[in-house]
Image (cartoon, rainbow, N blue to C red):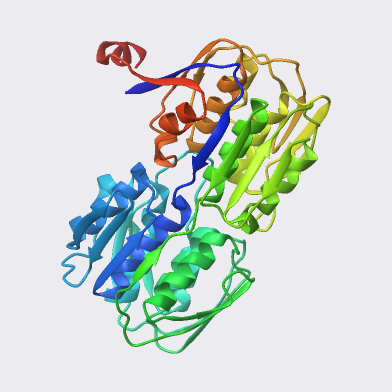
Amino acid sequence: MEKYVIRGGKPLVGDVNIGGAKNAAVAILPATILAGGKCLIENLPCISDVMASLQILSELGASIRMVSRSTYEIDTSHLDSTEVSNELSRQMRASYYFLGALLGRFGSGQVAMPGGCNLGPRPIDQHLKAFTAFGAEDSVEYGQIHVRSEHLVGGHVFFDTVSVGATMNAMLAAVLAEGTTILENVAREPHIVDLANFLNMMGADVHGAGTDVIKIHGVKEMHGCNYSIIPDQIEAGSYMVAAAITKGDITLHNVIPKHMEPITAKLRAAGCEVEEFDDALRIRRTGELKPLKLKTMPHPGFPTDMQPLMTALLTLAKGTSIVTEGIWENRFRYVDELIHMGANIQVDGQVAVIEGVKVLHPAPLRATDLRAGAAMVMAALAANGVSEVDETIHIERGYENIVEKLQALGADIRRVEIPANAVSRAI
């Protein structure tokens, strides 16, 4: 167990390289199952969710070779199991992508109910709706989801709600199904497009990713390929907030500015300067923060994963901000932590009303989930004094080398191991 000790109050200045997209990687790694051959995946972020996905592939029988810190060769020619272990699948929500990939290649798959951050119920009914449309049967026994089919056939699926997970899982199951699949009311996030591009590189026939209708013509077989994952939109957005909340000046490298537009627009409205280059962004703030009205929505709306970070930023805006969470019902659980720092926030259901304060005070803080944990780090960087952030294991599920990257920008942050006896006393 570790915690971060942060002495805030300094502007962050410098350059930071953005890693590969977590939300793309956790779907593309299971998708290698469909190749039945060797895939070379580049720009993989070195985070715990990716390591868990690689371990699951290894346990299923894949041969995995590390080429560099961010590049792995994965050979799924000789998989000998279609059951993901209970322990590994409960570590992260994205383990359910193995269902679609295993069903697509072998006609059978078994995964535990998804784990990950507690942001509210994570129903997989829309995933199962798609599998059923392709001719599969499903059952849940002792917390394990089983899907099976003798013969997958393409189908027409209209999703009841826009779901990134269900869209990706349906794509994974459909690419080897016989005939044509049409998916409507699908998610349009950049990582949906990245998965479609990867599947097409392996020989799939997927069209329309990035719109609200995806059409898939099933193919008889797929093959391995070399592929580089897109940069992480949320990691990039997090460092943009780091610049804004500390009155800093940060240039982000290895980004796709088009993917950042929903975040860039709000930060500009809040009083930040953002310059766009081919594969870089520079963000700085010199004046006061302006209040905002913000609602999280499916892409191209404002991303829910950025909501805690923007809420932390708006605690220092001059005036009243209103943040509405349109995706997850438990996403404001972290607000009490900001209140400990002197923030003035009232939450009513899915709406937070934020009256800006002049300063945040240092405090002991807790990372209640991945993005809330990142928000606590940013708030601590803005407070003038020493704060501590516990339960950092959540943060490192989605941020590669966050301490080292912040240190390179001038942050006074360090990891401190929590003694085992202190952990047991807290329990």
Q: Answer above or below: position of 10 versus 110.
A: above
Q: Answer above or below: position of 215 versus 165.
A: below
- Residue projecting furthest to the right: 319
Residue 227 visible: yes
Quarter of the image where one finds residue 222: bottom left
Image quadrant in which the C terminus is located: top left
Q: Answer above or below: position of 193 versus 45.
A: below
* Side of 96 relative to 123 (left or right): left
Quarter of the image where one finds residue 291: top right
Front residue of 289/157: it is 289
Q: Answer above or below: position of 253 versus 322.
A: below
Residue 233: x and y, percent?
Answer: 56, 50
The residue drawn where x is 61% and y is 61% is 162
Residue 231: x and y, percent?
Answer: 50, 54
Image quadrant in which the N terminus is located: top left
Quarter of the image where one finds residue 5: top left
Front residue of 224/254: it is 254
Residue 91 visible: no
The residue drawn where x is 29% and y is 15% is 424
